[in-house]
Amino acid sequence: MEITAAEVMKLRKATNAGMMDCKHALQEAEGDFNKAVDIIRKKGLAIANKRADRDANEGCVLAKTNGKSAVVVSLNCETDFVAKNEGFISFTERILDLALATLPADKEALLATRLDDRTVADHVSEQTGVIGEKLELAYYGKVEAAGCVVYIHPGNKLATAVGFDKEVDGQVMKNIAMQVAAMAPIAVDKQDVSPEEVEHELEIGRGKAQEEGKPEVMWDKIAQGRLNKFYQEATLLNQTFEQNGKITVREYLQSVDKSLTVKGFLRFSLS
């Protein structure tokens, strides 16, 4: 049967599939639009299953805030060529907007959230069929605070989000978001580091002291000193403020507002 260009364009708009794929799906469905949509979706699932064992190490990392909440999303693919594609970036932005609007509890909840007429997971599978590469929602996180800011490093490979206990000047918040991007802290402050991580660092410190031939009676003291250095390097408020070099991030924030502090942050990088 004859398939019109208008019918093909309608199916393309609904599925983002290629023109020839849409035409073939409509021919197979004998012109039935809904059946053609199902054919396109099944094709996407089939390709997704075939590529399930591929590595999706490239992608697009984006972040967005409404001032009180902030989200970071990473949609991964197989090649940098796809990651830079305008359609792929636009698809990531749609997921990002949905995440900010609904603030799901975790990545699994975001995948189960409906975007238009089906779930995010369904869309990702279908786009795998359209693009021909494995796609994966690799990361989703959220921060909610009195003041939030985000930073996306040029190239869409790294993004951060930071929440503060109060609203402050936008440049101040951006400076901290860039600090998180550059220095990759693991926690806000000392007390936010897990007991397991603390014990791990102490154990490393004791081991190094032993290797250096220090007296056993000094091992714990040396290990504690190494732990303090770890806190300075790995916790945001105790890091050296990169834009100054002479003060900590905590001291920088206190110079702006004595009680200003960071409530939480996110950082995700593809490299």
Image: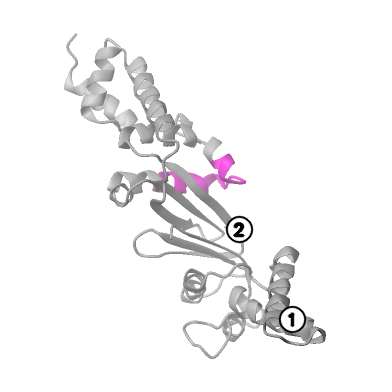
Pick whichever of labels 1 and 2 is earlier in the sequence. Answer: 2
Q: Where 106 falls versus 211 (above or below)? A: above
Where in the figure is residue 255, as x and y percent of width and height?
A: 58, 86
Residue 144 - label: 2
- Identify whether 245 is placed above or below 158: below
Q: Residue at x 63, y 70 (%)?
A: 188
Which residue reaches farthest right?
A: 217
Quarter the C terminus occupies: bottom left
Residue 187 falls in which quadrant of the image?
bottom right
Write down the region rendered in magenta: 93-110
* Residue 80 position in % (x across, y down): 31, 52
**Type of the residue with mark 1:** Gln
Furthest residue toward bottom: 246
Q: Is residue 107 magenta?
A: yes
- The residues bearing labels 1 and 2 have C-alpha atoms spaced at a distance of 34 Å
Residue 240 or 63: which is nearer the viewer?
240
Q: Residue at x 80, y 83 (%)?
A: 216
Who is closer to the viewer here, 206 or 184? 206
Quarter of the image where one finds residue 116: top left
Which SS class for mark 1? helix
Q: Which residue is mark 1?
A: 224
Q: Nearer the viewer, mark 1 or mark 2?
A: 1
Looking at the picture, how far across and down is residue 256, in whole percent?
57, 83
- Residue name at image x 41 percent, y 51 percent: 57
With 262 as the anchor, is 183 left or right in this view?
A: left
Q: Is residue 38 left or right of residue 218?
A: left
